[in-house]
């Protein structure tokens, strides 16, 4: 395993497995066809909706959390869709949403390859989305975690069951749709506002002072497009009027990030804006006045550490919800180990420290007030484990093998861990391991619940490198 791969996998394990131990660790799961699916704990009546005969498939997300079910349907006529809406309206939920979008829609989960994406058999006329409440609350309402603070679902109630219908290029005629009275209709087609907006995207927003609630005149709303993995290009702008209102019409098709800023306020990202087909996006957004934090980074003996990268993350604004700042809020410690980060909203945040062969000793769950000028961070040295994995004959085991490093203690919440695929030659080299006791083992992929790996227990000390040979246990199938 190379260093870059290990660092990525460690980050995933560190932030997800040990932060959300009750949430499934699956990636996106895709299912084709309309074989019946059982109730997963959804709102009453959802299972009847999920198993309609017009379903062509479904997928489960989000990655590393699960619980969001997206069912995909294709129908022959508007009458079939009207019958589906009757089933949808019978779901026992406090709110039911019908979202109207421009079509046609060709769902990429159903495609075999890029060329087949726009084939008629891959067309989707409408979708049904429903959440398992336990998964939603574990991801977005976990009182011990703020790692999802940048997500629009953070601290929000469980999303209402939703139908998205795609008008244009399919078999549904919107004018013939019969909408049950208990559905909330959200029309995302710019043409529903006025025919003059029909062919391009439309963004409307209101901006206000988060502390006073008063509208902010002259705030700038910006649409930015990604140029590469790191850089964004601002392509369209608009300014709010005296009522804090701004409208940006005639937006070319594409994907954008909506940013909002004003003089004397901390600029923030409002949302990702998917305008691959003309889409109407509307928002109200508060801006906060800027504050700062100051602090110092030392080793365990109290000596200052220079050159550590300090970044403010998981920022929560004064209203208790996420405040995603535009750009990084990161600095490097000076010779006295001191740092200062400006242009932060009043509220709370987490801190990430990155230094070569160093690990932050402070708990990842620790929250820091904004403003603050007495933050003290302690970093420790780390160790390295390298070696190889062999079978009983001394050769690299066949197939896909995963190497796992887990904390030896039963309490793993928030502790460091690592998991990743074994390299082709069976060797591994993992650095940046915090001091402590760990259990190292391997597991085949796929693996059975009854599989018992060979494991090694090791105590890692700062500044030391450990050479290991791990004998992989073969997996025997039960009959």
Image (cartoon, rainbow, N blue to C red):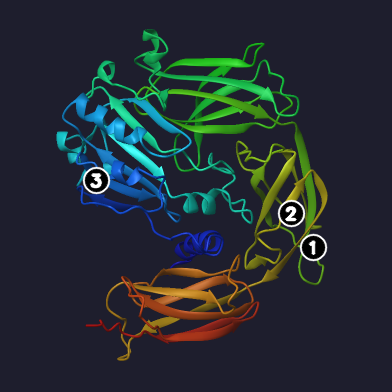
Which is closer to the viewer, label 3 or label 1?
Answer: 3
Residue 170 visible in image: no
Whether tag 2 and tag 1 are in contact, CB under 8 A, the answer is: yes
In 3D space, how far apart are the residues under numbered discs 3 and 2 (Cα atoms)? 52 Å
Give the image location of residue 408, x and y in percent. Answer: 57, 80
Left or right of 325 in this view: 9? left
Residue on which disc 1 sits: 304
Quadrant containing the C terminus in the rendered view: bottom left
In the foreground, 316 or 388? 316
Q: Quadrant of residue 470?
A: bottom left
**Rendered image: mark on residue 333:** 2
Residue found 37% across the figure and 72% down from its top: 423
Secondary structure under the numbered disc 1 in the rendered image: loop
Residue found 75% across the figure and 31% down from its top: 289
Residue 289 visible in image: yes
In the foreground, 82 or 270? 82
Q: Residues within 10 Å of mark 1 (few under 14, many from 20)?
A: some
**Rendered image: mark on residue 57:** 3
Which is closer to the viewer, label 3 or label 2?
Answer: 3
Secondary structure under the numbered disc 3 in the rendered image: strand
Q: Residue furthest bottom?
A: 393
């Amino acid at each position: 395993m190379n260093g870059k791969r290990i660092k990525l996998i460690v980050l995933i394990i560190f932030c997800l497995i040990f932060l959300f131990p009750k949430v499934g660790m699956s990636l996106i799961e895709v299912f084709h066809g309309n074989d019946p699916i059982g109730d997963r704990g959804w709102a009453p009546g959802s299972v009847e909706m999920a198993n309609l005969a017009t379903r062509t498939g479904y997928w489960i997300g989000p990655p590393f959390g699960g619980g969001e079910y997206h069912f995909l349907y294709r129908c022959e006529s508007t009458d079939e869709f009207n019958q589906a809406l009757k089933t949808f309206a019978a779901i026992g939920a406090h709110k039911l949403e019908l979202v109207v979008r421009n079509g046609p829609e060709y769902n990429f989960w159903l495609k075999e390859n890029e060329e087949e994406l726009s084939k008629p058999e891959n067309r989707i006329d409408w979708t049904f989305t429903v959440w398992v409440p336990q998964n939603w609350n574990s991801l977005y309402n976990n009182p011990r975690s703020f790692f999802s603070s940048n997500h629009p679902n953070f601290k929000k109630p469980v999303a209402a069951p939703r139908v998205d219908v795609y008008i244009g290029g399919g078999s549904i005629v919107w004018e013939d749709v019969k909408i049950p009275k208990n559905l909330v209709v959200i029309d995302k087609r710019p043409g529903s506002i006025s025919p003059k907006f029909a062919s391009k995207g439309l963004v409307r927003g209101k901006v206000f002072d988060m502390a006073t609630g008063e509208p902010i005149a002259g705030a700038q709303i910006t649409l930015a497009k990604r140029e590469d993995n790191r850089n964004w290009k601002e392509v369209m702008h608009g300014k709010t009027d005296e009522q804090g209102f701004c409208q940006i019409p005639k937006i070319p098709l594409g994907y954008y990030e909506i940013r909002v800023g004003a003089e004397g306020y901390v600029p923030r990202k409002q949302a990702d804006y998917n305008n691959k087909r003309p889409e109407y996006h509307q928002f109200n957004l508060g801006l906060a006045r800027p504050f700062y934090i100051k602090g110092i980074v030392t080793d365990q003996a109290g000596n200052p550490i220079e050159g550590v990268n300090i970044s403010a993350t998981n920022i929560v604004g004064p209203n208790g919800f996420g405040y995603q700042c535009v750009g990084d809020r990161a600095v490097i410690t000076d010779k006295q180990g001191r740092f200062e980060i400006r242009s932060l909203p009043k509220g709370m945040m987490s801190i990430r420290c990155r230094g070569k062969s160093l690990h932050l000793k402070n708990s990842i769950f620790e929250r820091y007030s904004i403003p603050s000028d007495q933050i003290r961070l302690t970093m420790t040295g780390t160790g390295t484990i390298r070696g190889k994995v062999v079978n009983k004959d001394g050769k690299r085991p066949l197939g896909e093998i995963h190497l796992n490093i887990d904390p030896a203690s039963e309490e793993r919440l928030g502790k460091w861990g690592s998991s990743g695929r074994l390299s082709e030659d069976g060797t591994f080299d993992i650095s940046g391991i915090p001091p402590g006791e760990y259990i190292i083992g391997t597991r085949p992929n796929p693996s059975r619940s009854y599989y018992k790996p060979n494991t090694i227990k090791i105590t890692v000390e700062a500044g030391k490198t450990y050479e290991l040979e791990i004998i992989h246990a073969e997996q025997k199938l039960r009959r």
